Amino acid sequence: MKRFGLIGRNISYSFSENYFEQKFKTEKIEDCNYSIFDLDEISDVKKLFEIRELKGLNVTIPYKEKIIPFLDELSPEAKRVGAVNCIKIEHGIKTGYNTDVYGFENSLRNFLDDFDLNALILGDGGAAKAVKFVLNQLNISFKTVTRKGEFNYSDLNETEIKNHRLIINCTPLGTFPNVDSKPEIPYRFLTSGHYLFDLVYNPEKTEFLKSGEISGAKIKNGYEMLQLQAEKSWEIWSALL
């Protein structure tokens, strides 16, 4: 039995297990399964890699950057991004890929009516690295907002919100089961000209998105991005199935 799975921390909510198990059924692939591997520490992945049947992994918060030292190779894109969310294991070689780039770019293209704008990226983890990569590719200028960085939430005034019409939440705030939380931005300055993109997909509409919707902003969650990156992972693993 060939094994695939998802590694992360506190990820029982993930859609990945059902998604890929359904893919195996649809494609009539009977010798594969997909599991959730909830790891307390990234070093626990070493035991996973000892499983001979393991052929591929997806990687989510908080391990997209921390997984890199445990891999043998990186795809050119993953190396440039500095984060990994997909691993292929072939002939004992563990290769890291970044399919978030594909997922985010295509989902963003389906969302934006206007690319002539500036962006705020909320958070600076592994997912944010893929977002930055895509925005650079699309020539969209951005600022990264963190709690303790050079540019933080206390710097977000009316002028900053007005000048950055695309706001992307790359933090886990609002993810099930902590659905009442949201990034601390001045939502009162949002307008109908703003676009709010939340990488969170569970719940379907986070407090971040609800607050944008009240102001008339266009909103989108991370579900389409998740589907697209999953399909790209499937493509990477296809030769192993």
Image: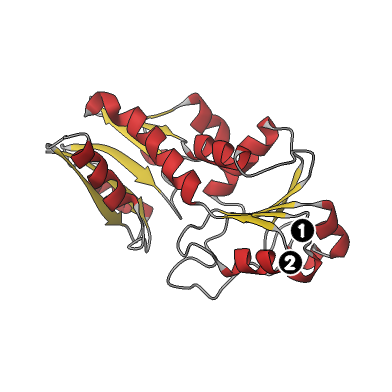
Query: In the rendered image, is residue 85 in sight?
Result: no
Looking at the image, residue 100 sits to the left or right of residue 162; the answer is left
> Which comes before the other along the chain, label 2 or label 1?
1
Image-quadrant location for residue 136 = top right
Residue closer to the observer: 213 or 155: 213
Q: Amino acid at mark 2?
A: Ser
How far across and down, in percent of the image, does residue 170 sit? 58, 54
Where 48 sits versus 12, above or below? above
| Residue 124 at x, y percent in the picture | 61, 52
Q: Amino acid at mark 1?
A: Ser
Residue with the mark numbered 2: 215
Please state the horizontal and vertical placement of residue 120, each as a whole percent of the image.
Answer: 72, 52
Answer with the quarter of the image where residue 218 lies: bottom right
Measured along the vertical axis of the image, is residue 133 above or below residue 16? above
226 left or right of 145 in image: left
For the N terminus, the image quarter is top left
Q: Which residue is mark 1?
A: 192
Q: Residue at image x 74%, y 33%?
A: 139
**Which secondary structure, mark 1?**
loop
Q: Residue at x 58, y 37 (%)?
A: 105
Q: Is residue 227 above or below residue 204?
A: above
Give the camera-side residue of 2 and 107. 107
Write down the quadrant of residue 229 in the picture. Answer: top left
Residue 179 image position (x, y, % from top left): 50, 72
Q: Are marks 2 and 1 in contact (CB under 8 Å)?
A: yes
Marks 2 and 1, Cα distance to the nearest angstrom?
A: 6 Å
Q: Which mark is residue 108?
A: none
User: Dot 2 lies on which element?
Assistant: loop
Crowding at dot 1, Cα within 10 Å, few <14 / some 14-19 / many 20+, comes out as few
